[in-house]
Image (cartoon, rainbow, N blue to C red):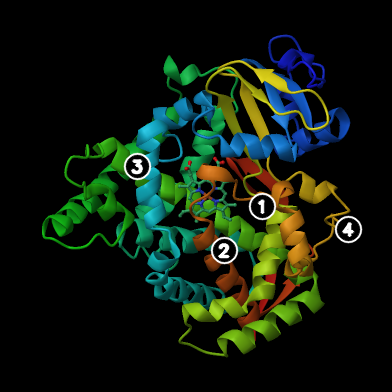
Amino acid sequence: MTSPAVTVRGLPGPPPLPALGNLPDLLRDGRPHRRLEDWCDRYGLTYQITTPAGPAVVTADPLLVDHIMRERPRLFRRDQQITRIIEEVGVHGVFTAEGDRWRRARRITSQGLNPAHLAGYFPALVTGAQRLARRWAPGGSVAVLPDLRRYTLDVTFALATGHDLNSLEQPKGRLATLLPMLLPAINRRMSVPVPYWRWVRLPADRRLATMLSELDSLIRIRTVSARERVAAGATPATVLESLVATPDGEEPFTQAELFGNVLTMLLAGEDTTASAVAWALHHLAADLPAQRRVRAEAVVALGDGSPIRAAEVRGLALAGAAVREALRLHPVASLTVVEAAEETELPGGDGPPLRVGPGTPIWTLMTYGSRRDSRRFPDPGRFRPDRWLDPVTVRQGDLRHLPFGAGPRACPGRGLAMLEATLLVALIVRDFDLAPDPASRPRERVAFTVSPAGLRVRLTRR
Ligand code: HEM
């Protein structure tokens, strides 16, 4: 016999303050994702918190997470408050879309990111890595993250629009300056309790509006050339060209959706991959034996010069494992917030099922288990890339470690992200000796995604 369902209010959770709920506690040290994990240790895998908007379920239970991720977009949609904030900024893309608009945007953006398509972009990845190596050639203590962001921005911009932005060598270009400011601006809006900008515009909001209109003009220019190429009969070669090439009978994307989808790709692909690489370099700098092994592997797989071919990345198992391990210790997107689209029951793990009403926010912790479960992840606090060479860890860890999400809305860019990150780590370790900078005390900073602040690595060209 199944036990009767409980409701959100029946779950344990940290005591809320009047009006603000658990928000002050959540934001206190600027690391809400870690606070949510600490509460999991205390209140169990599924608990409730209170935000100014009302109660929310938090879960790291693999069974629930699996169910929720599989049943999107039918039973669960992206949290509508988050969607509204992003769309108010003007970003109407695949990340916020639901229903048929999402299906279509997802199909088109995913096409541009599938392995067959990516092979065509491999030379751009290698060129970018070579520019990075030239930029870092003088060596010394290097703040690696800003340059890694320029690298990932260049790669994603090429994929989305076909244009070589080259922000690594022209870092003062408008797009290279504007885009890194956008995520922190969106994040700022997500962390204030009252959406004041709907009534009054502060200087930060006016700056954001100017920034967006400038981005819009820059992307409109690219849209015009994409339309011209497609109209001339060219097979779509970029995400933007695929978006403008509407098959007969299909409703075309609006200009706002074209802008939104290109911007979504740029935002989703930039910070995330750059942070994963930065953390991997940080840990390899501190772990000399692992660094030497990654180098030896890179020399065998890639040789010591160029050209580099896409197939050679398959020989970079240890570099790939270092990236996965960096993502385990410092997941860049460990929290996915959804809400129930209708009244539904979530399967109980060890306990009774949980009944949630339409609109109930559900905060899913996607990687909690991989830092707590010492049976499947021995010595979980340590950087041990080798664990990812063991197929048992990969298999058993799957539901406890979902850095790219799961189900129909799992990250469509994961193949590109792992390709970029693995190649970069291998090339940098092949060409530079990495050592820790004793003055560097990196800490996790949340700006929609989680990135390392204050991370520096000492580099010496080999
Ligand atoms: C280490 C790098 C990356 C990580 C950890 C990461 C992680 C994620 C996660 C957790 C999601 C949310 C899935 C959900 O809602 O359940 C997501 C969505 C998404 N990611 Fe990534 N991502 C990375 C790189 C990229 C790259 C390189 C691109 C493309 C250039 C990309 C494009 C997207 C898009 C378009 C979505 C929205 C998908 C949808 O809503 O259907 N990501 N990513």
Q: Marks 2 and 3: CB-CB under 8 Å?
A: no
Q: CA distance from mark 2 to mark 3?
A: 25 Å
Above or below: residue 425 compared with residue 30: below
Mark 3: amino acid: Arg
Which corner quadrant holds the N terminus?
top right
Residue 288 position, x and y percent, is 80, 76
Q: Which is more toward the observer, 31 or 399?
A: 399
Q: Earlier in the sequence, mark 4 or mark 3?
A: 3
Q: Could you classify mark 3 by the number of other residues whose Cα lies within 10 Å: few (under 14), some (14-19), or many (20 or more)? A: some
Q: Residue 452 has which mark? A: 1
For the residue with label 2, is its CB less than 8 Å from the closest atom of ligand 1? yes
- Observer able to see residue 455: no
Regarding mark 4 in the picture, which secondary structure is present there?
Answer: loop
- Identify the residue position indicated by label 4 in the image: 379
- Of tags 1 and 2, the one toward the viewer is 2
Q: Earlier in the sequence, mark 2 or mark 3?
A: 3
